Image (cartoon, rainbow, N blue to C red):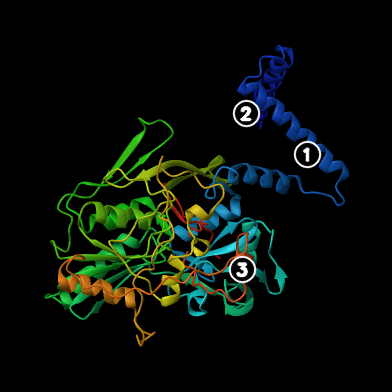
Amino acid sequence: MMRKYLLIGVSSFVLGAGAMAYLNRPAAADTPSAQAFKMLELFGDVHTIIKKQYVTPVDDKKLIQAAIDGMLTSLDPHSGYLNPDDYSDMRDQTRGEYGGLGIEVTSDEGAVKVVSPMDDTPAARAGIQSGDYITAIDGQSVIGLPLSEAVKKMRGAIGQPINLTIARQGKDPFDVKLVRESINVKSAKGRMEGDYGYLRVSAFDEKTTEQAAAAIKDLQLKNPKMKGLVLDLRNNPGGLLDQAVGISSLFLDGGEVVSQRGRDPKDIDRYNARPHGDVLHGLPMVVLINSGTASAAEIVSGALQDRHRAAIVGLTSFGKGSVQTVIPLRGGEDGALKLTTARYFTPSGRSIQKTGIEPDLEVAETYEQAEAVANEAFQFSEASFSNALNAEEGKIRRAPHEPAEAPPPGFDPKKDFQLQRGEDVLKYGSVAATPRMPTPKPKLASVLPGKGPAALAPGATATPAKPAEAPAAKPDAVKPAAPAPSHP
């Protein structure tokens, strides 16, 4: 107790000395430190007024936690404050085991926006899509509610039902009924697709590299004549940076995977693949991506593209090129800060912040998705956030353009067109040698000014496809902890 008391006393003395220095300083000396003390005094005044005059009593702890979170979220979409419960939940998420619906959500100007549903979870089975807005939970509006509170409402006892009201562009709001489950996501799974192996990586948690290596080994043992591999990173919102490096190491023989650079240009950390690590021994690869591919998933696809190890097929990725460091406060007793501390760069030196990874062969999953490529209003990406970090100087996300390849008339909707085109690239040996499919004619939708679901004019249709873990919350490459999008 004495030590704690002395620490408080020293802190108070330092603050008082600083305030006195500010008060005795000439008015012209408006230094950053003086400004900080002045604003802290303002904060105290506001807090006092709220305590005395707000219509109902306030909880000091919640009020100050909200102020801290507001300070952090004003920086960029992926920074924020995690209270002790949120910090504990985040650690559960990175272990790949937690309870809920299996959905990544982020905050978009006061609304809860879906980054992506996770494979084999209640959210995915119910048909919830990247880019959907959750407007109400069990009939109660969540518009304007802090993201952490909305996430808590979506979590609950296993087996307990929940009703989400969904707003989707081009459709009237509708309800989706789900049942909460224990989410124990297997983030890497493999199977054969004809002569080619298929590896689905849905997230980057603590077990991803281990699970992926085991899945590939199993494919090789059962199919020694396997001719190549499709790595599916679609709707993968990211996760742990070390796992992105681990997955990349399964297909590269040493060399750089990614670098991250902080505020100081000299502050560069480089992450390399393991020497002699290519478990496929040079077999050809294709990586599938879409606008739901974010952060750690973009690190992998960018590394394999830059190192000429794989062809990239699909749609331009989300464009989250920042790294969040999770900083526990008092060992986690007071929660943690999730703070953006660096940007990451692909081996060739590309920053993909806002711009994303562009595919070598642009392929849409549906005709509606191909149309969306021609309509900037329908693109959900890092660039959609008003306070996102700027892209590298001079770089912008690709503007609306001629639609990508789309399934031809009569294509079986139960089949995966992007996967089929990825297999075509493996079959023909390269993107250049793969015969092109006809692209649909652009169909520009009429849109109204504004953002979110209300921006869509009546009758306009689109299939938004995102993340961000998010994500984030987060969608995120994090060091050393979790994705930015929240996971109810």
* Residue 237 vertical position relative to residue 11 in the rendered view, above or below: below
Q: Residue at x 73, y 12 (%)?
A: 24
Q: Tell me the number on the disc at residue 47.
A: 1
Q: Residue at x 58, y 79 (%)?
A: 178
Residue 250 point in image, percent of width and height? 23, 58
The C terminus is located in which quarter?
Answer: bottom right
Report the Cα–Cα distance between label 3 and label 1.
32 Å
Earlier-in-chain disc, 2 versus 3: 2
Q: Tell me the number on the disc at residue 84.
A: none
Say which amino acid is labelled 1. Answer: His
Q: Is residue 220 visible?
A: no
Q: Tell me the number on the disc at residue 134.
A: 3
Residue 171 point in image, percent of width and height? 59, 77
Q: Tell me the number on the disc at residue 3.
A: 2
* Residue 141 vertical position relative to residue 83 in the rendered view, above or below: below
Say which amino acid is labelled 3. Answer: Ile
| Element under disc 2 | helix
